[in-house]
Image (cartoon, rainbow, N blue to C red):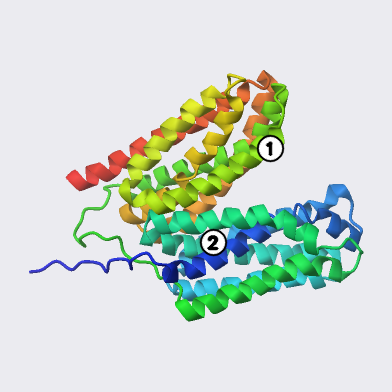
């Protein structure tokens, strides 16, 4: 009796990547837009500096709530349907931010837009992870490009004149890009979730829940590292008395984006476990190198390159070992790392001084390395069992 094999994912092409490039550029813009637009919100709604940050919090709360719900829905609906409805919610949310007559409605609209963003991200990350590490890294690199351009869009198109039109330029641009993304998906299609390219009778991990927990812990550490560098690297370099701390942090984010592009081009030559293990080992060494003032700026920048492959490659690895439909749950786990890491680094800084920052980052990198080793061991045990 012949063994059925799952359908192999489609070959990587610009047609396959089209909707991912359009969507993740749009998501990168709106994700980084709220902070630079705080002045516009204060002029429009008359809120205080202490209160204006609530709208960004509402957006991020919505983006955190959506992935677990989308993970359940993907068992019943197609990726195409999930992306389409999520794009509609995102467009309605950002339009509501512009047209809201009162501050509470603007905050509610930001939550709705964030929910749409989380839905698009969950669907497309799951779909591209099932295609392979090259695809998921490339589309996530475009997210970084959008994030870098968002402040320029706010400055160029926003007007602090206290009218709805002051917010219209940047936020309606995002709504228009949602329409463009929808159209691109209709023309070139939205990739579906593919089974991993292995035999249907290939062994699965003996304890899939444990294996999934290891991947989740790995992603918690990764996002914790990314958020930790973003929140505290500049402050640490300033405490060392080094010039150009802000420029170094910008170079860190640029390196992260460039690294994802390079991973997307060359990831097919290196297995996912080996890639993540190498990055984890490098991050431990780089965090410890930050303790040497002369090496600290370079170590921060190179850390961006070392972090770059981890996220997308881990999502692709998960889809091979377990299921791409678990990707939304990993995104939720990542949010936990983003919440806890800056707070933990702040506590360590306050208690032990600036030197605690690289040590804490090294501990996070070491934990990520440990969880990677355990995840690879579980996958190998299943293969040999």
- For the point 43% across and 53% down, the residue is 264
Task: Name the residue located 23 percent from the left edge and 46 percent from the top edge.
Answer: 382
Any part of residue 61 in sight = no
Comparing 222 with 206, the one in front is: 222
| Residue 50 screen position, x and y as percent | 85, 47
Q: Please tell me whether mark 1 sits on a helix, a strand or a loop.
A: helix
Identify the residue at horizontal 47%, vertical 60% (top origin): 125
Residue highlighted by disc 1: 247
Which x, y percent locates residue 342? 64, 37
Please state the horizontal and vertical placement of residue 176, each as a whole percent of the image: 67, 74
- The tally of labels here is 2
* For residue 249, above or below residue 88: above
Task: Say which of 78 and 146 sits in front.
Answer: 146
- Quadrant where the N terminus is found in the figure: bottom left
Where disc 2 sits, the SS reads: helix
Whole-angstrom CA distance, mark 2 to mark 1, is 29 Å
Residue beneath disc 2: 121
Location of residue 214 with respect to 2 vertically, above or below: above
Choose between 127 and 170: the one closer to the eye.
170
């Amino acid at each position: 009796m012949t063994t059925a094999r799952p359908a192999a994912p489609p070959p990587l092409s610009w047609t396959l990547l089209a909707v991912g490039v359009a969507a993740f550029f749009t998501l990168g813009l709106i994700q980084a837009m709220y902070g630079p637009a705080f002045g516009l919100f204060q002029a429009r709604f008359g809120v205080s500096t202490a209160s204006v940050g609530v709208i960004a919090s509402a957006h991020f709360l919505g983006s955190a709530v959506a992935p677990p719900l989308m993970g359940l829905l993907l068992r019943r609906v197609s990726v195409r349907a999930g992306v389409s409805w999520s794009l509609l919610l995102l467009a309605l949310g950002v339009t509501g931010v512009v047209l809201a007559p009162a501050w509470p409605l603007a905050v509610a609209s930001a939550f709705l837009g964030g929910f749409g963003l989380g839905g698009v991200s969950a669907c497309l990350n799951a779909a591209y992870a099932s295609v392979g590490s090259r695809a998921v890294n490339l589309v996530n690199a475009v997210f970084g490009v959008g994030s870098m351009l968002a402040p320029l869009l706010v400055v160029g198109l926003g007007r602090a004149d206290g009218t709805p039109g002051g917010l219209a330029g940047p936020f309606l641009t995002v709504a228009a890009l949602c329409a463009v993304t929808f159209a691109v998906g209709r023309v070139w299609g939205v990739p579906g979730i593919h089974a991993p390219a292995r035999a249907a009778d290939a062994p699965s991990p003996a304890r899939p829940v444990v294996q999934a927990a290891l991947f989740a812990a790995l992603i918690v550490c990764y996002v914790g590292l990314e958020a930790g560098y973003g929140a505290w690297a500049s402050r640490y370099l300033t405490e060392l008395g080094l010039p150009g701390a802000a420029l170094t942090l910008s170079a860190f984010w640029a390196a992260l984006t460039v690294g994802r592009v390079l991973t997307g081009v060359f990831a097919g030559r290196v297995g996912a476990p080996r890639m993540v293990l190498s990055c984890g080992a490098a991050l431990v060494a780089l965090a410890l190198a930050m303790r040497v003032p002369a090496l600290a700026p370079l170590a921060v920048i190179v850390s961006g390159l070392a972090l770059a492959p981890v996220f997308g490659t881990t999502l692709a690895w998960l889809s091979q070992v377990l299921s791409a439909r678990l990707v939304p749950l990993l995104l939720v786990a990542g949010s936990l790392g983003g919440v806890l890491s800056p707070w933990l680094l702040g506590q360590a800084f306050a208690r032990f001084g600036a030197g605690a920052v690289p040590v804490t980052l090294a501990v996070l990198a070491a934990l990520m390395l440990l969880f990677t080793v355990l995840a690879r061991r579980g996958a190998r045990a299943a293969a040999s069992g």
